Amino acid sequence: MNIVALLLLTLLQFISGIGVLALFRLSLRNGLKIPLALLLGVAVSSLVPFLLQLLYVPLTAFSVFSALILTALLLNLHMGRTAEQWKRMFHHIHFTMKLYELPFILLMAAIVLISVWRCYYLPPTPRDLTSGPEVLAAYAVREHTMINSVFSVDLLSTNNPYKPAFITSLQIIYKYAGFPFGQLWLSVIFVSFTLLLYQLLCQSLHRLLAGVLLLCFLAIPEMYAYTFMALFDYSNAVFFFLSVYSLTLYFAEQSRSYLYFAAWLMGIATYIRPETLVLAFFFIPLLVYRQWGRQRLGQLAQDAAVFGNTGCVVICGCRSWL
Amino acid sequence: MQTTVSNRRGGLLLLLTGVLAIALIIIVNRSWFSRIAGYWRAFPSQAAQPDLEARKVSRYGNAYILSRSIALSLERAGKKETALVLVPPTSYFKAKGLNYHVPEPAVFYYYTSLKTVRPDTKDTANINYVVSVENKDIAIRKVKDKQQLSKILAEYRKYRITL
């Protein structure tokens, strides 16, 4: 396995993620910040080949990785804010583990390892992937464009090539990084989300109970299978969860940064699966209900518009792909 | 001193509780866990087989092997680039005694870089090769004329087309 390439790419995504957190002025503790930055980095990098394609830039290894580096730099351009994020991160590095956490951690590490191995080793199987994003990505690497010879094939039996460019873009990046089957981006999402979930559970529960709940979550057969079966569902669920969690933080803290962050995350979830927009609108009554009395009507409408319309903007953007 | 001892005892008690909880979760989710154990057992043999082609063969099975063999025979004849191959549906192969799950054109293209069509295609004008089964073996024929193609299409359309 090309470990060095994977580590460098993950580091690049992490730097981008820290940049996004700094842009939203979010101050989180390390346990949350590190996995969240990785997740945000994957989301940001999934937009890069797509944007290059929209700008008619040929998708070569050089152009893709240059654009990824440039994105990481641009997101960290506001030195004052990002420097603070990095400083806080390095000042508070401490790792504690209780003895009773060990059996959970070992078992979960084994479960995670199997998932990562299967992502790396096995070629993509689901028809939704091989007749859509995967075949597009495979030929994009050969022909340096997402609008490639796949569209000259009889596509009567499938609409999968017209699905969002999220997976296609990530597959292109990971194929260029030396992984012929791509897919390892899903492992980055899975590992980061598992870490994040454990940290969130530990915030309000005993670590033993957090371990039990997380193991129960991993033992959901469909959910676990989606961690090595590259499809839209798992990533969509992760970003949808993050958005809703951020929205709850907005209700608790009344800091608008969390609302903007929630809206941005919902936009990412909508980019992965456009029907998420419907779910986003389901949260607007909750937003109005929770903020009623705390804000003026105009401000309330503005909040609802911010939360709902980010998805709309994403959908409009993705329509240009079609 | 007393606090340290009770802390240690508490820690051990929690460790025991944790191990019991894990055992309980495994028992409740036995079928899930046995599948994970199966994946774990497959690891050494998979690690010993790093060849990409072998990984594809073991994952995709006959669908990949037979599709590749169709593409390979056209490649050897130097016709792969210009060929548009009509492939009958899976039910046709089943009726002829062959276990071949025919991939849809996009997946066929992913496996082999060969352009194919199903019998329900609208693009019949450009079909220049046809796959059939002769003596329980896959044969690839060049299309002679439109009449022959219409006859073959009519025959293939009698079989149910599935994904």
Image (cartoon, helix red, strand yellow):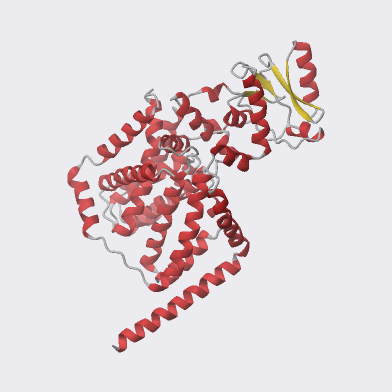
Q: Is any part of residue A292 visible from this angle?
A: no
B137 in relation to B81, above or below: below
The x and y percentages for residue B128 are 68, 15
Q: Farthest bottom residue? A: B2
B49 in relation to B162, above or below: below
Q: Residue at x 35, y 52 (%)?
A: A36
Q: Residue at x 30, y 64 (%)?
A: A95
The x and y percentages for residue A135 are 53, 32
Q: Nearer the viewer, residue B148 or B135?
A: B135
The x and y percentages for residue B58 are 62, 43
B57 in relation to B2, above or below: above
Task: Describe residue A10's horizontal placement relative to residue A275 as left or right.
Answer: left
Residue A73: name its quadrant: top left
The x and y percentages for residue A75 are 27, 40
Q: Is any part of residue A105 visible from this angle?
A: yes
Task: Describe residue A184's horizontal placement relative to residue A160 as left or right.
Answer: left
Q: Nearer the viewer, residue A206 or A131?
A: A131
Q: Farthest front residue? A: B48
Which quadrant, please, contains the N terminus of chain A?
A: top left
Q: Residue at x 33, y 43 (%)?
A: A8
Task: Describe residue B129's horizontal placement relative to residue A226 as left or right.
Answer: right
Q: Nearer the viewer, residue A2 or B86?
A: A2
Q: Farthest left residue? A: A80
